[in-house]
Image (cartoon, rainbow, N blue to C red):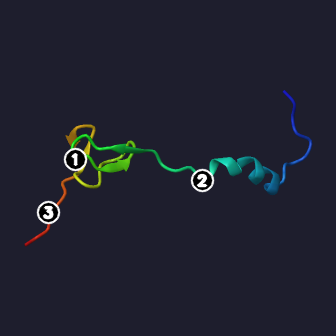
Amino acid sequence: MAHPKRRQSNTRTAKRRTHDKAVAPTLAICPNCGAWHVYHTVCGECGYYRGKLAVVKETAAE
């Protein structure tokens, strides 16, 4: 394989990587409560992940 003779500048490296920066997260619908949440994370509304309770959510105190 070829080896570079000179170091690539930071500007040139940044230009190559610009297309990876602004990617919107993938959203999914929670099968338990129907709310939208970020894929592969615990649902913020009910606290379930993959059909199991992962985080106990506290209800509003009266």
* Mark 2 or mark 1, earlier in chain: 2
Q: Circle 1 sits in a helix, a strand or a loop, which is it?
A: loop
Q: Which label number is shown at residue 33?
A: 1
Q: Amino acid at mark 3?
A: Thr
Q: Which residue is mark 3?
A: 59
- The residue most toward the bottom is 62
Q: Is residue 40 left or right of residue 46?
A: right
Question: Which percent across, then down, holds residue 1?
Answer: 84, 27
* Mark 3 or mark 2, earlier in chain: 2
Question: Which percent across, then down, holds residue 13?
Answer: 77, 50
| Mark 3 → mark 2, Cα distance in angstroms | 35 Å
Total count of labels: 3
* Mark 1 or mark 3, earlier in chain: 1
Q: Residue at x 7, y 72 (%)?
A: 62
Q: Circle 2 sits in a helix, a strand or a loop, which is it?
A: loop
Examine the image and state in which quarter residue 11 appears.
Answer: bottom right
Whether the residues at callouts 1 and 3 have beta carbons within 8 Å, the answer is no
Q: Residue at x 19, y 57 (%)?
A: 57
Tag in front: 2 or 1: 1
Q: Which residue is mark 2?
A: 22
- The residue most toward the top is 1
Question: Which percent across, then down, holds residue 28?
Answer: 37, 43
Q: Circle 3 sits in a helix, a strand or a loop, which is it?
A: loop
Badge 2 crowding class, 10 Å Cα cut-off, few under 14, some 14 to 19, many 20 or more, is few
Badge 3 crowding class, 10 Å Cα cut-off, few under 14, some 14 to 19, many 20 or more, is few
